[in-house]
């Protein structure tokens, strides 16, 4: 499949790169890295994401190329979905993007069912960025500093700074290669982990007030509602990583973060330790992701949502007993 996708990219003239809404480090890093790779091949390229780039990722070289208005799709002969488990995850423009002649998907989520014929899905990869390097190599593109910084950011964010179980020998070998190509681990870490706006600390304080520990200390959860977000003048990007704060509590095997979206629905972020498969929980409610990091969206009042999620969490924890 790698060869087929490389051939399709080589024959394409005008390409659209798109990733999921509320882009994270892997989605943005992969998109912008491949933008540089395609430009070096003389391709016409547009990088689109429905949502704004979080401030923490604006340091990525080439991030200014990301547009948030798609325009006519007839100009594109090929579209690549990066770090996107399904077409609907790109947002409001999903139907128009689906009409583009050639669709290619590159992803590493367990929930990706490979419905797009040209799909390169490796659920054992640390990140979409890791998979993308194989394609970049196949295309004969040099791993420049700009590409390396973006890919390194994709890898480091999706592995939790090489702490998660998706970190493999290949991941470390790739990281070494990226550093050799010009990626600076200190700079990336400072930008991603040590440059947080004050509002995030205030949200953290509000979230801690809602902390609930259940199932004998194995499950921890926090809630942020629309009122709290409005009072702090916070953006969705300011909630990133709050669920990991709960997972770090001693004894907690599954962490849950209930975030009330502007439309009143809830986004539920799930994190786990060890063999607790939270992807199974997310999938039950139409979401997906990875074994130890997944998400879904639900409608209803917070008590009903919590009851349903915690019941599903209880099922997966029983399976590991």
Image (tube, grey):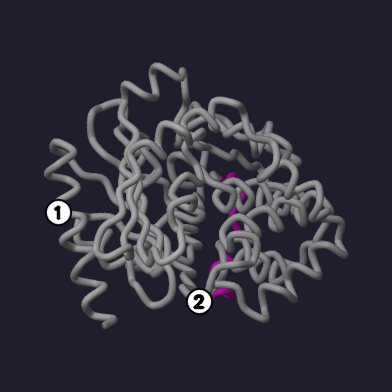
- Residue situated in front as seen by the camera: 122 or 206: 206
Residue identified by numbered label 2: 124
Horizontally, residue 100 falls left or right of residue 217, namely right
Residue 146 is left or right of residue 30, and the answer is: right
Q: Is residue 187 magenta?
A: no
Classify 186 as above or below 170: above
The quarter holding residue 303 reads top left
* Residue displayed at 79% across by 49% down: 146
- Nearest the eye: 230 or 262: 230
Q: Is residue 3 magenta?
A: yes
Observer-nearest residue: 209 or 32?
209
- The residue at 69%/57% (across/down) is 151
Q: Residue 231 shows which numbered tag? A: none
Task: Write the start and end of the magenta stretch as one range.
Answer: 1-15
For mark 2, give the secondary structure.
loop
Say what secondary structure mark 1 lies in: helix
Q: Which image quarter: residue 209?
A: top left
| The C terminus: image quadrant | bottom left
């Amino acid at each position: 499949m790698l060869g087929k996708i490389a051939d399709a990219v080589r024959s394409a003239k005008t390409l659209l790169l798109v990733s999921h809404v509320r882009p994270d480090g892997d989605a943005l890093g992969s998109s912008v890295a491949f933008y540089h790779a395609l430009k070096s091949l003389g391709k016409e390229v547009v990088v689109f994401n429905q949502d704004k780039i979080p401030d923490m990722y604006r340091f990525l070289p080439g991030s200014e190329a990301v547009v948030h208005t798609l325009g006519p799709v007839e100009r594109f002969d090929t579209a690549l979905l990066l770090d996107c488990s399904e077409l609907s995850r790109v947002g409001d423009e999903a139907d128009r993007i689906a009409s583009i002649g050639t669709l290619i998907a590159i992803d590493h989520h367990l929930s990706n069912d490979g419905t797009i014929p040209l799909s390169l899905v490796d659920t054992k990869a640390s990140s979409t960025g890791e998979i993308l390097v194989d394609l970049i190599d196949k295309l004969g593109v040099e791993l420049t500093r700009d590409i390396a910084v973006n890919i390194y950011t994709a890898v480091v964010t999706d592995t939790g700074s090489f702490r998660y179980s998706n970190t493999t020998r290949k991941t470390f070998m790739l990281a070494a290669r990226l550093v050799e190509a010009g990626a600076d681990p200190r700079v990336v870490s400072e930008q991603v982990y040590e440059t947080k706006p004050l509002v995030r600390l205030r949200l953290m304080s509000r979230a801690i007030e809602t902390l609930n520990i259940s199932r004998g200390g194995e499950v921890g959860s926090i809630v942020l509602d629309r009122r709290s977000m409005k009072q702090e003048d916070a953006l969705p990007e300011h909630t990133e990583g709050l669920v990991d704060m709960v997972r770090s509590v001693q004894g907690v095997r599954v962490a849950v973060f209930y975030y009330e979206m502007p439309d009143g629905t809830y986004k539920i972020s799930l994190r786990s330790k060890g063999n607790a498969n939270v992807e199974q929980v997310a999938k039950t409610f139409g979401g997906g992701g990875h074994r130890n990091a997944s998400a879904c969206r639900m409608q209803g009042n917070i008590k009903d949502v919590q009851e349903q999620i915690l019941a599903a969490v209880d099922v997966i924890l029983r399976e590991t007993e």
